């Protein structure tokens, strides 16, 4: 039986020399790989009590949507600035070279709602931290962050130290 790692394509020296890019398109384009990814993410939610799933743009949508469907939970979107049509709240976060902003509809989270945040990757933790701050600004509680992969060498867990975090695959490097 294949492990999820077997479906992830590793591309050396992309986007620059010394980096190994972990490509999830090979997980998505294989029906067994995609099913395994969703099943493994579901396992990370065993015993977690929550009300909504929050997906971070854009790969968080890919993994959050089937989880929300299977678990019969609402799916809340965290999008890049300017992509949501109604009144939003926003959160800026740091990138390696500059900043970015994500937004959420102002009415997406109700006070006291418990959220699980889903994304494909924990890298530096900036996007996930911004998503958590949006949830908390609206009075929600982050119960857990789950991701398909984690690049431990980028120390995203440190930025997210106040949250319960789980990933299916952990790569030690960057």
Image: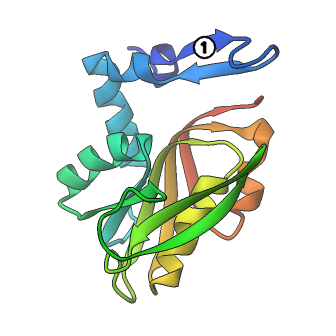
Q: Which quadrant is home to the N terminus? A: top left
Look at 72% across and 50% down and name the residue there: 156
Q: Is residue 83 above or below residue 147?
A: below
Residue 49 location (% of width, % of height): 36, 71
Secondary structure state at the residue bearing disc 1: strand
Residue 102 location (% of width, % of height): 52, 60
Q: Which residue is mark 1?
A: 10
Look at 45% across and 16% down and name the residue there: 7
Of 41 and 21, nearer the camera is 21
Look at 74% across and 60% down and name the residue there: 159
Of 135 and 72, nearer the camera is 135
Is residue 109 toward the left or the right of residue 70 in the image?
right
Residue 86 location (% of width, % of height): 30, 72
Q: Is residue 117 above or below residue 119?
A: below
Q: Is residue 10 above or below residue 79?
A: above
Is residue 145 toward the left or the right of residue 17 in the image?
left
Q: Which quadrant is home to the C terminus? A: top right
Residue 59 location (% of width, % of height): 42, 40
Is residue 60 toward the left or the right of residue 129 in the image?
left
Could you say which quadrant of the image residue 154 lies in? top right
Of 17 and 123, nearer the camera is 17
Q: Residues within 10 Å of mark 1 (few under 14, many from 20)?
A: some
Number of on-image labels:
1
Could you say which quadrant of the image residue 113 lies in? bottom left
């Amino acid at each position: 039986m294949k492990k999820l790692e077997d479906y992830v394509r590793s591309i050396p020296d992309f986007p620059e020399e010394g980096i190994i890019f972990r490509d999830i398109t090979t997980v998505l384009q294989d029906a067994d790989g995609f099913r395994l990814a969703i099943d493994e993410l579901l396992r990370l939610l065993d015993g977690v009590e929550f009300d909504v799933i929050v997906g971070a743009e854009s790969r968080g949508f890919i993994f959050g949507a089937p989880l929300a469907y299977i678990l019969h939970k609402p799916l809340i979107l965290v999008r890049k600035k300017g992509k949501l049509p109604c009144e939003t709240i926003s959160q800026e976060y740091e990138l390696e070279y500059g900043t970015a902003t994500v937004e959420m509809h102002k009415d997406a989270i109700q006070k006291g709602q418990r959220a699980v945040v889903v994304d494909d990757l924990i890298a530096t933790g900036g996007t996930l931290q911004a998503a958590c701050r949006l949830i908390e600004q609206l009075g929600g509680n982050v119960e857990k962050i789950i991701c398909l992969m984690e690049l431990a060498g980028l120390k995203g867990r440190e930025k997210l130290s106040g949250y319960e975090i789980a990933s299916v695959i952990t790569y030690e490097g960057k």
